[in-house]
Amino acid sequence: MSDNPYPMHVGIVVTSAAQLAAVYALLGGASPVAVAAASPSPAPAASASPSSTSTPAASPAAEPAGDAEVDTDGWPWSADLHASTKGKTQTGHWRMKVGVSRPEPKPGFPVAGASASGTGTAASSTAEAAPAASPAPAAEEDDEFAAFRAAAAKTDAEDNAAKAAVPPRKWTDADLGSLCNQAAVKLGDPAPVKAIIASYVTEGETPHSRNIPEAKREAFAKEIEAKAGIEFAG
């Protein structure tokens, strides 16, 4: 084959170190022992320790920042809407700036069972809540005349109590006679007064004011006053 200017190249495929040694031996190369000694040792199996097989743990997510405080209607404090004092009403609403109307409650607010202190957070809006009822009208805020109205109501109550404590007037014969004369003068005619007297006197009695029964005298006097448009001065 040395005369062949075009030497042939034959590919040999081996599948093991023993076959490779045999090929070298046939071709006059290294001995099978040397080939076997030079063959690379199989790589050690990878350690199955948990540290090598486990997936690196992801770093824990950062804790979310604290949610802003909201009022009963779910609104956080806003410098455009609310008073700079950041105070709340008794119903848990932020106090509004003068001239600014309170916005409608956010969806899901007011939360059922929430306290009126208004210390809830925005996270509470995600909680399941019963369908919100129509909010009751908020009490008048910053009422500087509340004390005045309370004092006036107390005075009215005391006056009513005092009036109720005053016993009914006892109409004497002299009182009724004087009232009837005042009414006759005002009307310019005693006939209407006599007609009223007759309706109050017991049947068979003389139609005179002194014969009106005690139980009917208060009603009689009021009717005479109303008829003549006067008020008995005594």
Image (cartoon, rainbow, N blue to C red):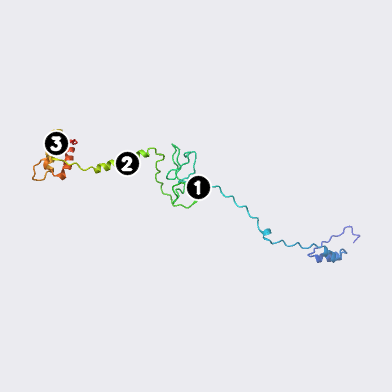
Counting from the top left corner in percent of width and height, residue 154 is at 32, 41
Q: CA distance from mark 1 to mark 2?
A: 43 Å
Residue topped by disc 3:
178
Task: Name the front one of labels 1 and 3.
Answer: 3
Numbered circle sitting on residue 187: none
Q: Earlier in the sequence, mark 1 or mark 3?
A: 1
Residue topped by disc 1:
122
- The amino acid sitting under disc 2 is Lys
User: Where 79 sits versus 127, above or below?
Assistant: above
The quadrant of the image that shows the C terminus is top left
Task: Name the front one of labels 1 and 2.
Answer: 2
- Mark 1 Cα shell of 10 Å, populated few (<14), some (14-19), many (≥20): some
Numbered circle sitting on residue 154: 2
Q: Earlier in the sequence, mark 1 or mark 2?
A: 1
Counting from the top left corner in percent of width and height, residue 35 is at 83, 64
- The amino acid sitting under disc 3 is Ser
**Circles 1 and 3: CB distance less than 8 Å?**
no
Where is residue 220, by image quadrant?
top left
Q: Report the number of discs.
A: 3
Please name whichever residue, 9 or 68, is drawn nearer the observer in this view of the structure: 68
